[in-house]
Image (tube, coloured by chain):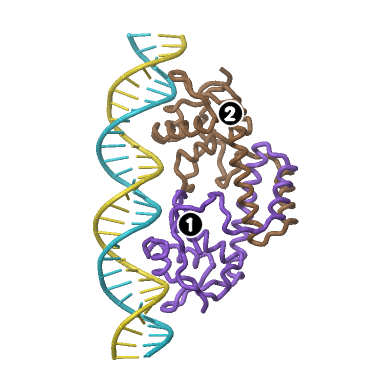
Chain colours: A brown, B purple, C cyan, D yellow
Amino acid sequence: MIVLDLRDKRPIYEQVVEKLSQLIVCGVLEPDSKLPSVRSLAIDLSVNPNTIQRAYAQLEQDGYLYTITGRGNFVADSSSWKKGRMTVVENDLRQALKEARQTGMSRESVDRIVTEIWSGASDVTANSASNAETASQIDSNGGEE
Amino acid sequence: MIVLDLRDKRPIYEQVVEKLSQLIVCGVLEPDSKLPSVRSLAIDLSVNPNTIQRAYAQLEQDGYLYTITGRGNFVADSSSWKKGRMTVVENDLRQALKEARQTGMSRESVDRIVTEIWSGASDVTANSASNAETASQIDSNGGEE
DNA sequence: TGAGTGTATTAAGACATTTAATACACTTGT
DNA sequence: ACAAGTGTATTAAATGTCTTAATACACTCA
């Protein structure tokens, strides 16, 4: 389900936050479905439970999941993260566009790229790290709660 | 000339690289003009010369400046950085657009933002961190060669 | 009760960033 | 030649973040 990129210089917990939030945003992980436990995910990724705990704490902070002590972590409803996510995404986009214009990229080039992105498949798993699908499944349970 | 943002969690040398490369890209600093010396800029920013040296080394690596030992650092021609800059900028833009689409932003919203950016003034100094406070001014020398 | 869950704490090591204090070779103006 | 200013290199120490390790505690559920 999740594959860590060892070449990525960012902290592990940050990668986990990125990957899981993507899966939640694009709907692969449905609301109220159970996420892997802190310990099981730590084992699957071969990292320390504290590292996963930190990632989950951040995801909860950002509204991507909610926690029930003794039971586990569950995917939150989109209403919890939609607003904050949109703000972040829009800021990132504005920043990238400003840099593009500053560097001399034409509007036509930008429009071409936009069209290209909006035409292609919205591939969540496609990252700089070309991942093999054969990773340890994190599912724990099959689905709903 | 340059103002460091103390709230920015990125390394100082990285901020210096960003600010100076922006000034070079947008033409505020003209090719072959002399940049502040390592020591003077360090004093102006109240940081260690080694930190500035590191930033300058990175800027030279990226083609934004060239060095003449004993004389100083000078702004490079756009031909030196145009290609690499374009690649980085386009990748950033593609990433931001993918995130935007993933989050559910409409093409119309994107087009609206693009139009907005391409209409507004290309303000180099305007960053996400609306800074106006606690920072150290850089001024060093008046700068021609 | 026992297994599984989230949560918290403390200690240690690895690593990056930054500062400090020098030192050396080069260029320029005198 | 000399002094001042330049880039460059080195070593050491301090600081902060990330990660691991080893526990411990409260909760839920079968």
Does residue D18 lie above or below D29 as drawn? below
In the image, what residue occupies the spot 62% across and 38% down? A86
Q: Mark 2 falls on what kind of element?
A: helix
At which x and y percent is residue A82?
Answer: 62, 33
Q: Residue furthest front?
A: B133
Q: Is residue A125 left or right of residue D10?
A: right
Q: Mark 1 falls on what kind of element?
A: helix
In the image, what residue occupies the spot 58% across and 28% down? A80
In the image, what residue occupies the spot 56% across and 42% down? A131
Q: Amino acid at mark 2?
A: Ser
The image quadrant that residue A50 belongs to is top left
Looking at the picture, tell me which residue is in the foreground, A24 or C14.
A24
Q: Chain of mark 1?
A: B
Q: Residues within 10 Å of mark 2 (few under 14, many from 20)?
A: some
User: Are the numbered discs 2 and 1 placed on the same chain, yes or no?
Assistant: no
Q: Residues within 10 Å of mark 1 (few under 14, many from 20)?
A: some
Label ID, residue B15:
1
Badge count: 2
At which x and y percent is residue B93?
Answer: 64, 51
At which x and y percent is residue B101?
Answer: 67, 40
Does residue B4 lie above or below A22 as drawn? below
Label ID, residue B139:
none
Q: Is residue D25 left or right of residue B82?
A: left
In the image, what residue occupies the spot 41% across and 78% down? B70
Does residue B16 lie above or below C29 as drawn? above
Cβ–Cβ under 8 Å for marks 2 and 1: no
At which x and y percent is residue A17?
Answer: 51, 36
Q: Amino acid at mark 1?
A: Gln
Label ID, residue A80:
2
Q: CA distance from mark 2 to mark 1?
A: 33 Å
Q: Chain of mark 2?
A: A
Looking at the picture, tell me which residue is in the foreground, A19 or B7.
B7
